[in-house]
Image (cartoon, rainbow, N blue to C red):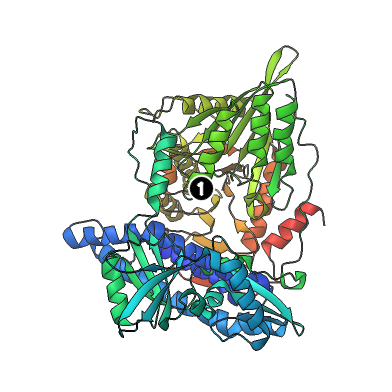
Amino acid sequence: MEQRRYFNRDLSWLYFNERVMEEAANPGVPLLERIRFLSIFSSNLDEFYRVRMPVLRALQKIGEKDTNAIDADERRGILNQARELINAQQERFGQILRQQLIPAFKDENIHLLYNEPFPDVVKDAVKEYFLSEVLAFLQPVKLDEDHFFFPENNKLYFVVNLLSDARKEEIFFLNIPSDELPRFFTLKADETTYIAFLDDIIRYNLDKVFSGAKINGCYSIKITRDAELDLMDEYPGDLSEEIDKQLKKRDFGLATRFLHQADIPLRTLQLITRRLDLQSANATAGGMYHNLKDFFGLPVKNSKLSFDDWKPVNRKGLSQLASDSRDMIIHTPYQSYHSVLRFFNEAAINPDVKEIYISLYRVASNSRIVNALISAAKNGKHVQVMVELKARFDEANNLKWAKKMKDAGVKIVYSVNALKVHAKIAVVKTLRNGRLVYSGLLATGNFNEATAKFYTDHVLFTCNRDLLREMELVFIFLSKRKKPADENLVEFKHLLVAQFNLQAKFIELIDREIAFAKAGKPASIILKMNNLEERVLIDKLYEASQAGVKIQMIVRSICCLVPGVKGMSENITIRRIVDRYLEHGRIFIFNNEGKPDVFLGSADWMNRNIYHRIEVCFPVYDEDIKREIIKIVALQLQDNVQAVALNQELQNVPLAKDKPEMQAQREIYRLLSGN
């Protein structure tokens, strides 16, 4: 069989999600963290159905209609492969939960009531909780010609079959209000903590909802809908108003998955499918419980069952940046994010600070950074914020904050529809001795203090004039709200900016290593990113491998490059790391004859990042910081505990234990904490 040149991006992502689930089966992971890994798997899979399944189905139709389409054979089969893989993963999910985690919780005197009758000791408490707290939120709706019902996206429902006096079956939909009440109810009795699903509490008390009726069956369902917003590339009106309208339509999008309890009667299933127009959705038989992402909030308070506490290290000297300050860096979450918060807080109250510019992609729900920006504007400073309203699933939160900032006098800039702004940069201008002095931040992750607690990222504090001048050029360009017609419109000599020079600069850096290899000199590249898909850059890496350049990659999730193929990629190795923190920082290291060039930034090598976003990657000029970054990446490349290798079949292959165990995240924490 001919060797494939590229992995399919969606299958690659599903194998990454499988790697996440396998942490739930890992006995070396604390019990509460294991069930949280299951919740992450469940959340990821929901997003796959909301975002990628509509694309896969569209590609399948293209393949069916156009036999000359590129990769037509692959397109026809990819949807079936994805379904088979998902079904196998869901079966594995159930095995891990039922056979490993629930028994392990029982050993800790924690009884998770999962698909079993309530013990007598909890029945009275469950009834009382239902009558006092739950009943007010229930809204039964009869399925007939007189009652219109449209299930909300990803919400939980019961289908209840009732038998009337005339022996005629009636069907009702009943909501499970897990967005308004806790998903789990806890009760401690006889030294055991019992945890019951809200779903089961409602099932147990159905006779109080349908008083006097004969209940003939109760079955759980969930409908997942396409999450894409329908925006024109050049929308002439107020983008915030259009986003708001589109968000209200999201719950009415095309149904991509109809998840139902496996034992629902066929006649009931067919009637629901027809009446709710679900014929095109992927009907999937599942268990009694859906939205198991809620396991992330399982109400268990036992520090022995969680990861040992790694208190973030405070890095001093990062707030008072003068014009001659050296660059400094923090690595979250190993080091405290307080330095970033303090940077913006001090800028907001410092009377010498005159202007603040920042790009925001995903904002914390209770953002201290945004509150500091609002304070700065109220203190008379010019504050300009580029808010990306099209950050998927964060649109409503970003829109809320944009409106609050605008009301406070902040100048709000939105991206054009054809481009998302994914850059993570900020510039502060301070008046010193009669002139404006610049300082700023460049980051690999969002300015978001919530995600900074569990995303590994890097934030560079800089007063480098060259970098800051070019950051100002980025903000000037963004304020014009135009897609660049000419990549030479703005000349960047230091920053790598998508739509301008980012792809070309990376190709130039790879070509330089190729030239070294062909000249018989040592040549190597180390790349760390979340996703790798863009084929121009992949092909350039293949070319480098064929020239003898040693390429080591850490790719967390999607990876379309096939490693280790003789004559194509035999000099390329790829590994992925899944551990307590989500690996998120992007790092690019080019050997350059032993004088390495190191870049950090916001950009993965995906089509969306290269062609449809404004991204900023930046050079690391400070030699001490450069050495620190290289040391961190070296630890990750030595990980043989939480890292796996990616093979030519897309599989996650455990690494050989021929060396002492080395867990990179633990060693990085020790390194940065001075232990």
**58 left or right of 639?**
left
Position of 374 with respect to 537 (left or right) is: right
Q: Position of residue 346 (x, y in %)?
A: 74, 31
Q: Which residue is pictured at 76% across the width and 52% down the height?
A: 312
- The residue furthest right is 675
In this rendering, position of residue 438 left or right of residue 142: right
Residue 440 in view in this figure: no
Q: Give how far across and how far down residue 420 sits, in percent.
A: 44, 39
Q: How many marks?
A: 1
Q: Residue 210: in sight, yes or no?
A: yes
**Vertical order, 471 against 650 (above or below):** above
Please provide percent x and percent y for residue 379. 69, 23
Residue at 59 percent of width and 72 percent of height: 130
**Residue 264's image quarter?**
bottom left
The secondary element bearing badge 1 is classed as: loop
Comparing 445 with 552, the one in front is: 445
Q: Nearer the viewer, residue 154 or 580?
A: 154
Give the answer, above or below, for where 329 lies relative to 163.
above
Give residue 263's quadrant in the image.
bottom left
Q: Residue extending furthest top?
A: 434
**Quarter of the image where the N terminus is located:** bottom left
Please name whichever residue, 550 or 573, is drawn nearer the observer in this view of the structure.
573
Instruction: Classify 463 as above or below 278.
Output: above
Image quarter where the C terminus lies is: bottom right
Residue highlighted by disc 1: 394
The amino acid beneath tag 1 is Asp
Determine the residue positioned at 27% across, 58% down: 58
Question: How crowded is the residue under tag 1: few (<14 C-alpha within 10 Å), some, or many (20+)?
Answer: some
Q: Position of residue 363 (x, y in %)?
A: 58, 43
